[in-house]
Image (cartoon, rainbow, N blue to C red):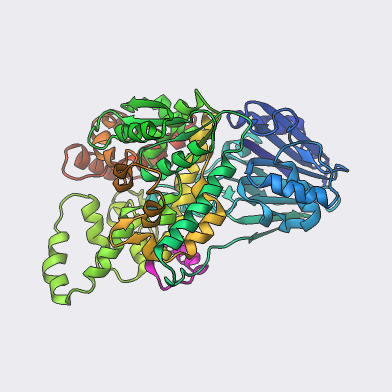
Amino acid sequence: MCGICGVLEAAKNGESVVNGDLLKRMTAKIAHRGPDDEGFYVDQSVGLGVRRLSIIDLATGHQPIHNEDKTVWTVLNGEIYNFKELRRTLQAQGHEFYTSSDTEVIVHLYEEHSEEFVRSLRGEFALALWDEKRRTLILARDRLGVKPLYYSIDGKRLIFGSEVKSLLASRLIQPEVDLEAFDLFLCVGYVPGRRTMFRGISKLLPAHLMRWEDGQTRIRPYWQFASESVKNKRPASFYAERFLTLFEEAVRLELVSDVSLGVMLSGGIDSSAITALAAQGTFEPLRTFTVGFEGDKERNELEDARLVASHLGTDHYELSSSFDLDIETFARLVWHMDEPIADLSAIGFYYVCQLARQHVTVALAGQGADELLAGYRRYKANRIDGYYRLLPAFVRENLIASAVTRIPRASLLKKAAWTLGESNLAEWYARSLTVFSPQIKSRILHPDLKSDREDGTLLRELISSYLGEFQSTDSLSTLLFLDSRLALPDDLLTYFDKMSMANSLEVRVPFLDYKLVEFCTAMPSDLKLRGFTTKYILRKAACPLLPRRTLKKRKTGFFAHLINDWVRNKMSNHVREMLLDPAAGSRSFLDTRGVQWMLDEHMNGRQDFGRQIYCLFLFEIWHRVFLSNNL
């Protein structure tokens, strides 16, 4: 993996700002993404920069990479897994290569197919390509959004990079809060869609390509999800066999590396299945890594991981931690994430990456399986809700509804009560994601921000825009699609990238190989969620590979279930100190009386506001790190 950045100016009006010093500032901020090498390309008003973590072709893979006559240049963050096949084809067409790297296929593919070259790439990537002759820049991001790419367009200037902090290091952008992004953050605990928490800085969406020419930009998708799952015309054994074939291929491709490699093993079926296949494809004992939370023995997955490691004969490493963090540690993690992401799993993932990096440079992980194969509880909840709507109206209104709405605590049951009976799938989905209900949001927002920022309109508009791309009568397929467009790229994969790169570790995700994704998207829904059995097809396909206990294991949230007690006990002093500080940067956005009420309700055990308080706490830290500079 690497970190890339660049600046372009449409026309030379006097002296250009693009120079080596600017690019060095931008790459220095992301040196953790590529500690092995750096490279630059400057051509008048165009500059590209890269920091490289050497994985393939350690000797000659220096970037930027160029074509034969040095008129096309590219920088790449990520890996192209089918590069050997592409290279053979391009050589047969007469192209000459000067490296053995995966990156070089990009410039020659561009010569053959112009901007359509991106359709040939199989991998996880964010890239920039500069065509000197046409004075054209191409930016592209992989289909599922494994690797990030940020950009800002200011008049006639384009700035881009793998991380927001790289853009800010250009000193051409002043950091300010995007109020609409803040509203979305309160809705879901992260910033979904194109926006970021920084006004004027956007994300290139997954599976999208940007073309910049003479100051004009055009952004378009180059790949889309299939719109409908097929009717089940074949036996489950057919799909299980085909699934396993594609899954094995994805794992095999992602084992290609010139440096040491391992697997992040949680003990669940996703990472265990990857470990089983990876162990078959390596000559030496495979290294596996697990992190657990020592304060919760009942849900600690260390024992489950040991079982799989022993069964497969891996060289296993583990870490047990209390995650008792100080403010400085939180500040460092938020700095790496660029934005507040209120997902406690990010902390656990940071530490398992730290553990893995002590032994390997590349690790495979099971991210994406839940969104691909229906692994979350909300998919079962939606099915239950469908059964609930079949009950007679008087039963729903006079018995069940009146009971659930009396639940006193702001818990999962309270959220279930809010979603129960909602027939509109988009509305049901929005409610299932919501962190701050409209009532709570109204109570904690600063009076100047209330107006129309209480009912979640922006989130519903975003959901509706995504649904315009996907037509299906199957509710599960629709929910999986929405998760793949929202939570997967903007929450899970964002912290996944930032926490791994904070440790200079490349992490690969076989479940998000696009050919496997296309097959699973078209697969009948009852092979993903059969009754209330999640990931049915994976369990069936993995039967010969794993212990029965692993196949039957239910999903355990990666420390997410601990957040209420964690905030109430380990974090109580930190959150009060930060959120009630008279100098808190969040005071311009939050009503102190509302925040005080929420803290009192939670700390006294009257209601569970752990997730909400964690959101506000991270926002305050983010504000201090990137705007106030008072940490």
Q: In the depicted view, which residue is nearer to us: 244 or 506? A: 244
Give the farthest residue toward the top: 358
Residue 33: x and y in percent read 59, 32
For this orientation, the residue located farthest to the right is 69
Q: In the shown orientation, is residue 92 left or right of residue 562?
A: right
In the rendered image, residue 461 lying in the magenta stretch gets the answer yes
- Kindly tell me whether residue 535 is visible in this rendering: yes
Q: Is residue 449 visible?
A: no
Q: Nearer the viewer, residue 303 or 501?
A: 303
Q: Which residues are magenta?
A: 460-475
Residue 132 part of the magenta-drawn span = no
Is residue 606 shown left or right of residue 367? left
Left/right of residue 565 with respect to residue 148 in the rendered view? left
What's the residue at 81%, 53% (across, down)? 111
Q: Residue at x 85, y 42 (%)?
A: 70
* Residue 283 higher or lower than 274, as above or below: above
From the viewer's perspective, tell me whether residue 420 is left or right of residue 339. left
Please state the horizontal and vertical placement of residue 343, each as a whole percent of the image: 38, 42
Q: Residue furthest front?
A: 544
x and y percentages locating residue 536 in the rendered image: 36, 56
Q: Is residue 459 above or below residue 4?
A: below
Which quadrant holds the C terminus? top left
Q: Residue at x 11, y 70 (%)?
A: 398
Camera-nearest residue between 391 and 287: 287
